[in-house]
């Protein structure tokens, strides 16, 4: 891993660590202020933000890949700015359309999908209205971050990302200490995310000639739209599989039982920002060089990513796994922990292997092969849906966690297998990484089986 990429990865890890800690600290405060049922509904609101990649059709990621790739080809920043403006305009238009849809569909989601009634239903419906109003600006913020990452300005990005991310969790938790009205807590979440666009916009303004005069000849946007098209499929199916399970569970279980699944899942999914941030730092470098045209640099990045996953991902998860029962009790109380332990163990197994999956995923997408990752997700979707229904019927909420783990394991093995076939020049580096991932999974499973 090159020195610059290593520094970028370090900044990314620093930038996500503060929000991760804030999220962990916020859950007990939210549980105390809202109660278990309203916390379950609040986690569903967080799930809507998890669908950001669906709402923007992957344009944020496409902008990162486009900027890095075009710079690698020698294009000037004013020429690239023309592509970026088109991408951002598309994001804002999509965000507006999705916001209108969510606003008008809030009642149906509340009553027909979540089956909520009374005061809780009214508060939830108003909260979803706040999310709808904030959605266009939230998507624009995500895309502006993509622009900065394409330029590899990771230090500046993370100096801003850390406080914004922490505020996303801490401000709603603070509001919950003064009122148990769920709509006000969700409104604080929405407003925090929406106002962040001003900060991201100012940073882009200082770092990139976004409104530079048009340079001839103009760069073609065909590759960006093609990248976005396939990525939108992946970003629809991927977050759907990550977040839609909670909506399925909310349809058949009361909110307090759903919270046994969603609360640990939200905390664990937030932890994946560590491996994803490391690979996001490598992503523009891979797109700039190209794994096929510069295999030596790609091999160095893959080895460095592997060491990072073992040292900064597997070992912390293993330590948490060793003391998980006590840790859950301290975090959420003995009663909640006793009911959620088995669920959390299955989810932790999935989260562990999912961290290693970020390596081949970033490699394939940096090469523009979003079609491959999209097709993998399309294969997984019906299999996961069937497993979720069958295992939930058989084992209840714990069965949902088992299905989630099975999907992630299948996804990881398939990603590595295809990456090994697609990049023969770095095959000798990818195979040991896959073996290390499976070994780490086996060790953690043995710890839980004690």
Image: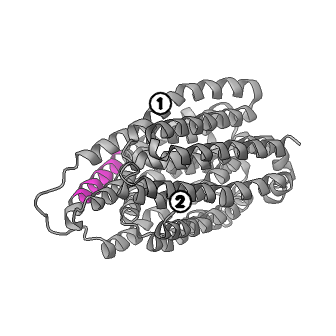
In the visual, does 128 lie left or right of 448?
Answer: left
Element under label 2?
helix
Disc 1 to disc 2, C-alpha distance = 25 Å
* Residue bearing the label numbered 2: 277
Tell me where residue 75 sits by quadrant.
bottom left
Residue 301 x/y as whole percent: 50, 58
Q: At x 43% / y 67%, what residue is drawn?
A: 195
Residue 165 x/y as whole percent: 54, 65
Residue furthest left as drawn = 216
In the image, 103 versus 226, the foreground residue is: 226
**Helix, strand or loop: magenta stretch:** helix
Residue 93, magenta (yes or no): yes
Residue 256 x/y as whole percent: 73, 43
Quarter of the image that includes the C terminus:
top right
Q: At x 54% / y 25%, what residue is drawn?
A: 382
Provide the residue span drawn in magenta.
83-97
Residue 378: which numbered mark, if any? 1
Asked if 424 appears above or below 168 in the picture, the reply is above
Q: Is residue 18 visible?
A: yes
Q: At x 51% / y 62%, what residue is drawn?
A: 1
Residue 346, magenta (yes or no): no
- Mark 2 surroundings: few (<14), some (14-19) or many (≥20) residues within 10 A: many
Tell me where residue 286 sits by quadrant.
bottom left
- Label located before the other in sequence (1 or 2): 2
In the image, 444 versus 245, the foreground residue is: 444
Residue 396: which numbered mark, if any? none
Residue furthest right as drawn = 450
Instruction: Count how many numbered circles sit on residues in the image.
Output: 2
Asked if 281 appears above or below 95 in the picture, the reply is below
Q: At x 81% / y 45%, what residue is drawn?
A: 341
In the image, 132 versus 11, the foreground residue is: 11
Element under label 1?
helix
């Amino acid at each position: 891993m090159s020195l610059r990429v290593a520094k970028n990865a370090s900044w990314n890890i620093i930038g996500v660590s503060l929000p991760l800690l804030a999220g962990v600290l916020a859950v007990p405060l939210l549980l105390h202020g809202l109660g278990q049922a309203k916390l379950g509904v609040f986690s569903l609101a967080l799930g809507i933000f998890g669908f950001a990649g669906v709402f923007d059709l992957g344009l944020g990621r496409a902008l990162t890949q486009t900027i890095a790739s075009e710079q690698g080809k020698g294009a000037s920043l004013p020429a690239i700015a023309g592509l970026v403006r088109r991408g951002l305009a598309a994001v804002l238009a999509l965000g507006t359309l999705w916001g209108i849809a969510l606003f008008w569909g809030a009642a149906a989601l509340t009553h027909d999908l979540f089956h909520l009634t009374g005061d809780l239903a009214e508060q939830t419906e108003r909260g979803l209205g706040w999310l709808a109003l904030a959605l266009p600006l939230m998507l624009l913020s995500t895309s502006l971050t993509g622009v900065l990452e394409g330029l590899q300005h990771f230090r500046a990005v993370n100096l801003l990302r850390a406080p914004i991310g922490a505020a996303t969790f801490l401000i709603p938790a603070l509001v919950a200490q003064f009122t148990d009205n769920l709509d006000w807590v969700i409104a604080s979440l929405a407003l925090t995310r929406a106002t962040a666009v001003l900060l991201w916009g100012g940073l882009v303004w200082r770092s990139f000639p976004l409104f530079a005069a048009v340079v001839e000849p103009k760069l073609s946007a065909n590759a960006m739209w093609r990248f976005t098209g396939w990525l939108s499929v992946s970003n629809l199916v991927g977050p759907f599989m990550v977040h839609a399970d909670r909506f399925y569970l909310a349809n058949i279980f009361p909110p307090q039982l759903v919270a046994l699944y969603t609360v640990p899942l939200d905390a664990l999914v937030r932890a994946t920002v560590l491996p994803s941030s490391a690979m996001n730092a490598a992503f523009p470098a891979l797109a700039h060089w190209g794994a096929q045209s510069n295999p030596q640099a790609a091999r160095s990045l893959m080895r460095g990513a592997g060491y990072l996953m073992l040292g900064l991902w597997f070992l912390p998860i293993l330590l948490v796994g060793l003391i998980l029962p006590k840790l859950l009790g301290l975090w959420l109380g003995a009663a909640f922990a006793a009911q959620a332990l088995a669920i959390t163990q299955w989810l932790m197994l999935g989260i562990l292997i999912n961290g290693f999956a970020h390596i081949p995923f970033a490699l394939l997408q940096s090469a523009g092969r979003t079609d491959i990752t999209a097709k993998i997700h399309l294969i997984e979707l019906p299999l996961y849906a069937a497993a979720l229904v069958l295992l939930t019927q058989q084992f209840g909420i714990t069965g949902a966690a088992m299905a989630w783990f099975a999907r992630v394991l299948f996804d990881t093995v398939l990603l590595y297998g295809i990456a090994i076939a697609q990049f023969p020049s770095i095959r000798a580096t990818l195979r040991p990484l896959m073996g290390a991932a499976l070994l780490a999974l086996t060790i953690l499973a043995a710890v839980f089986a004690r």
